Image (cartoon, helix red, strand yellow):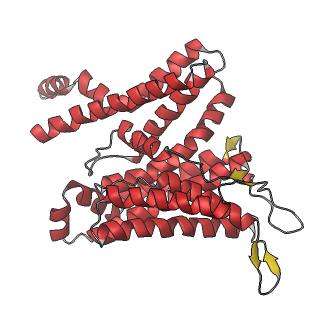
Amino acid sequence: MTQAPVATSAWRRFNPGRILLQGRAFFALITIIAVFSLLSPHYFTISNFLTMSSHVAIFGLLSVGMLMVILTGGIDLSVGSVLAVSGVFAGFLMQGIEIQSAGVILYPPVWAVAILTLGFGAFIGAINGILVAVFKVPAFVATLGMLYVARGVALLMTNGLTYNNLGGSSALGNTGFDWLGFNRLAGVPIGIIILAVVSLLAALLISRTAFGRWLYATGGNHRAAELSGVPTRRVTISVYVFSGMCAAIAGLVLSSQLTSAGPTAGFTYELTAIAGVVIGGAALAGGRGTVRGTLLGAFVIGFLADGLVIIGVSEYWQQVFTGSVIVLAVLLNSLEYGGRRTS
């Protein structure tokens, strides 16, 4: 007797349009896979999916870091340059550190190179965070400036050239740098596993800890969060540090895949990272977004770009298609969150 009204109410709440809107990244990914599988017999294969996922790992790492920043209502335009300068920093260490006064050259092991590079990325992120949280510099301006600074430092370190042959030497004890880019565990590329671990940590951080609640509160209403006792300054600095570390990891993985590190790597990748976050359903105004959605957004961009290459679409039309998807994602975000504000 009491089940009929409940079933009727549930049926009335069933809204196909809202389901499509909220699950747009998932449905877009399914559509992309289906369409390109029909257009090319080489698309729907396990080896191709693993190859495309290795490419997505770079964008995915940047996007997860970017999500944390956007959740607070900020933006990090420097991630592409931080990726480049981190790769160059790792390449510089792999070439050996010359101490002229002692007449020796030190070759740090690969694990030390990775840790120092992570610290380097965190340092750049901390500068961004301090500029935004302490000195109240608008995030757009602070990170835009860092974009140029980091790219300039990368050019200065290499004199505009590229560090090649990062494989190291067994005699020097610094081999194994290519492990990140070429090795696999149980058939899965290391880059994908790193993306999965970082994403899992980020998801647990924002969904299971007080820090995650502070993130959403800071992005939802910064002033109200501050008055409620949320350490908004510490939260803001932390997310930029996290974004810098994600960019440094992406720089390590990319340099390993290419076995070289150049100052022009990661050019415009910051826009791709923002696109992944937006396509995944996060609000650019802050306070809304998930790691799961961001990963789907990164896969949408990566699978679309690789699919266009596989079927032979020119680079010019690839940019047109990718840009159209981003504009459509922003439009759908506006429809979703604009409706909520009105209600």
Instruction: Say which residue appears at 56% left-offset and 63% top-offset.
Output: 153
Q: Nearer the viewer, residue 288 or 324?
A: 324
Depicted 59 relative to depicted 238: above or below: above
Quarter of the N terminus within the rendering: top left
Left or right of residue 192: residue 271: left
Instruction: Say which residue appears at 22% left-offset and 24% top-offset.
Output: 15
Q: Nearer the viewer, residue 140 or 19?
A: 140
Quarter of the C terminus within the rendering: top left
Instruction: Say which residue appears at 28% left-offset and 44% top-offset.
Output: 283
**Residue 327, quarter of picture:** top left
Is residue 343 among the parts visible in the rendering?
no
Is residue 158 among the parts visible in the rendering?
yes
**Residue 4, quarter of picture:** top left
Q: Residue furthest left?
A: 343
Q: Position of residue 318 (x, y in %)?
A: 51, 25
Tally of marks: 0
Left or right of residue 304: residue 109: right
Q: Position of residue 69 (x, y in %)?
A: 36, 56
Q: Position of residue 86 (x, y in %)?
A: 59, 60
Instruction: Say which residue appears at 23% left-offset and 59% top-offset.
Output: 217
Q: Residue furthest bottom?
A: 101
Q: Position of residue 76 (x, y in %)?
A: 39, 55
Left or right of residue 240: residue 266: right
